[in-house]
Amino acid sequence: MTRPGSGARRLRTSVRPEEQEAVILAAARREFAEVGVRRAGMDAVARAAGVSRSTLYRRFPNKDALLAKVGEAIALATMRHLAAAVRGLPPREAVVEAFVECTRIVDEDPLVRRLLLDEPDVADVLVSQTSRTAGEFLEASGAAVAGTLRRAGATMPDDDLLLVSEHFVRVALSLTQIRTSRLDIADVETVRAYATKFLAPVVW
């Protein structure tokens, strides 16, 4: 990691605010993934992003606020990715592909793995920063999944679809946080078979 005074590249003062924010968030995501959220320092993020401490703190008053913005970006990118993965598929196939992609993201993304597996208490902070309660987080995530399945052609009543979608989110979180030898989420075909047999049939 670049130390102060070692020639770290500074962002041009003329750079647009949204570009500067993107660079800061990318630096924060790397720092959180490499050393963990608890150990990550705002000064280290500022150095990695090539901005001053005052610039960083003007945009993000503390680490929790920075983490919340990183989490928001991850959630948005994930939903876009899932929407692309299920585009053109009928509802049950969409369930399977979305579930496979969710588990793959958790297994391969170092920051997502840290938040869900290594530092779950930090994930609780992230939830509290983006919504008032964990229940609201689940409801929002379930609603996003339900919208995706509806666009894929699901015809079941709204209340049922929302409940089933929330169930999928709960299952995905549980399987990634508490692992057993019976279901290896790193094995795509095992995950696909599980979703095909136990999850897809409840959607219509």
Image (cartoon, helix red, strand yellow):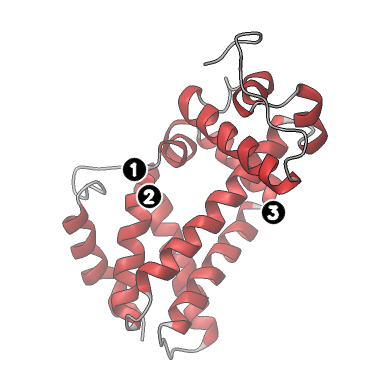
Q: Residue at x 44, y 70 (%)?
A: 83
What is the crowding at mark 3: few (fewer than 14 residues within 10 Å), some, or many (at least 20)?
Answer: some
Q: Position of residue 139 (x, y in %)?
A: 59, 65
Image quarter of the C terminus: bottom left
**Left or right for 53, reference 107:** right
Dot placed on the residue nearer the N-terminal end, 3 or 2: 2
* Marks 1,3: beta carbons within 8 A: no
Dot placed on the residue nearer the N-terminal end, 1 or 3: 1
Between the residue at mark 2 and the residue at mark 1, the CA separation in whole angstroms equals 5 Å
Check the image and report above or below for 161 versus 46. Answer: below
> Can residue 175 be spotted in the picture?
yes
Residue 98 quadrant: bottom left
Q: Residue at x 74, y 46 (%)?
A: 16
Q: Residue under circle 1?
A: 108
> Can residue 41 be spotted in the picture?
no
Q: Residue under circle 3?
A: 131
Q: Residue under circle 2?
A: 105
| Residue type (three-letter) at the residue carrying disc 1 | Glu
| Residue type (three-letter) at the residue carrying disc 2 | Ile
Label 3 SS: loop
Q: Position of residue 7 (x, y in %)?
A: 61, 13
Q: Residue at x 19, y 48 (%)?
A: 182
